[in-house]
């Protein structure tokens, strides 16, 4: 079985498992993290499987980076955080748990504890509402 056949993010791209999507285009997908470090925590992934920064094609990396910037701008407008953490890890030792290149966008408030994941799954309806706010800002 290929890596992409087993990959949870590839399954999301194919529609085999659900995700609360913010936006997608032909090359990238932005969706809400189900165990967010803060409200609005989203992930940006390439639709093409690459395990990490070492494997992703330069053209895909450039496209993902542009999508990260657009998502961050929409997140800033929609949620008005004090800042946005951009996190990208490579390898288990660095904290990577899903081996499909991805970038975390984590809205931050002054004094908020740093972290890449929350301790509990988020309410799906809350994720949908946050995704809708970010999408509206993106499209507005």
Image: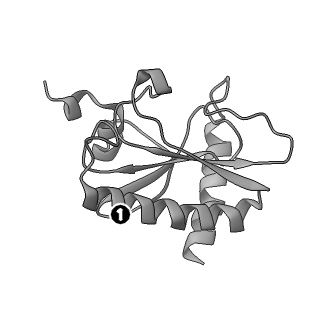
Residues 43 and 125: in front is: 43
Left or right of residue 95, residue 130 in this image: right
The residue under the point 27% across, 47% down is 56
Residue 24, x across and y down, in percent: 40, 60
The residue under the point 20% across, 29% down is 3
Q: From this view, report whether residue 57 is shown above or below residue 18.
A: below
Label 1, on which residue? 63
Secondary structure beneath label 1: helix
Residues 23 and 126: in front is: 23
Q: Quadrant of the N terminus?
A: top left
Point out the residue furthest to the left here.
Answer: 1
Residue 10, x across and y down, in percent: 29, 39
Residue 20, x across and y down, in percent: 51, 46
Q: Quadrant of the C terminus?
A: bottom right
- How packed is label 1: few (under 14 Cα within 10 Å), some, or many (20 or more)? some
Left or right of residue 108, residue 64 in this image: left
Q: From this view, report whether residue 97 is shown above or below residue 19.
A: above
Residue 35, x across and y down, in percent: 60, 31
Left or right of residue 79, residue 62 in this image: left
Point out the residue furthest to the right here.
Answer: 111
What count of labels does the image hold?
A: 1
The residue under the point 72% across, 35% down is 114
């Amino acid at each position: 079985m290929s890596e992409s056949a087993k990959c949870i993010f590839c399954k999301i791209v194919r529609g085999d498992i659900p995700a609360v999507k913010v936006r997608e285009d032909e090359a990238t997908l932005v969706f809400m993290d189900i165990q967010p470090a803060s409200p609005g925590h989203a992930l940006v992934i390439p639709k093409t499987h690459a395990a990490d920064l070492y494997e992703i094609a330069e053209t895909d990396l450039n496209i993902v980076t542009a999508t990260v910037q657009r998502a961050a701008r929409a997140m800033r407008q929609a949620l008005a955080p004090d800042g946005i953490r951009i996190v990208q890890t490579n390898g288990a030792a660095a904290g990577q748990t899903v081996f499909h290149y991805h970038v975390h966008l984590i809205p931050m408030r002054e004094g908020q504890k740093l972290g890449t994941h929350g301790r509990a799954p988020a309410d799906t309806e809350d994720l949908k509402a946050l995704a809708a706010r970010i999408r509206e800002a993106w499209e507005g």
